[in-house]
Amino acid sequence: MKKIKNIGNYYGGLWIQEFENKYYWIIENHDTDFSILSEWSEITKSLYQELLWEKEI
């Protein structure tokens, strides 16, 4: 699980993760439970990679 800098809201930020060869993101909220995969939205591998690239800038 990785946090993407400079993207978020009052409670937290944008988080991405790879799990079982699938890619997901979530915007942290006051009641976010990161351990519940159904709260995450699946994204494409290319979007995941672009977000990782942004994280490194």
Image: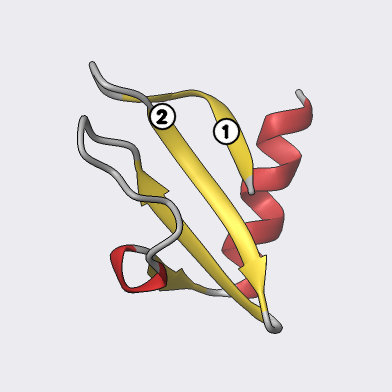
Place of residue 32 in the rendered image (x, y in percent of width and height, measured from the top left) = 29, 44
Q: Nearer the viewer, residue 37 or 57?
A: 37
Q: Is residue 7 above or below residue 49?
A: above
Q: Quadrant of residue 10?
A: top left
Label 1 neighbourhood size at 10 Å, few (<14), some (14-19), many (20+)? Answer: some
Q: Which residue has dot 2 on it?
A: 13
> What residue sits 50% from the left and 65% below the top?
24
- Marks counted in the figure total 2
Q: CA distance from mark 1 to mark 2?
A: 7 Å
Q: Based on the displayed image, in which of its 4 quarters is residue 27 positioned?
A: top left
- Answer left or right for 47 relative to 53: left
Kind of residue sitting beneath label 2? Gly
Report the residue marked by disc 1.
4
> In the image, residue 51 lies at what x, y percent?
62, 46
Q: Are marks 1 and 2 in contact (CB under 8 Å)?
A: yes
Give amino acid for label 1.
Ile
Residue plotted at (58% across, 71% down):
23
Q: Quadrant of the C terminus?
A: top right
The structure residue drawn at horizontal position 41% and vertical position 29%, both measured from the top left corner, is 13
Label 2, residues with CA under 10 Å away: few <14, some 14-19, many ≥20:
some
Q: Earlier in the sequence, mark 1 or mark 2?
A: 1
Q: Which of the 4 image quadrants contains residue 11?
A: top left
Q: In this rendering, would 9 be left or right of 37?
A: left
Residue at 57%, 33% in the rendered image: 4
Tell which of 6 and 13 is nearer to you: 13
Q: SS for tag 2?
A: strand
Secondary structure of the residue carrying numbered label 1: strand
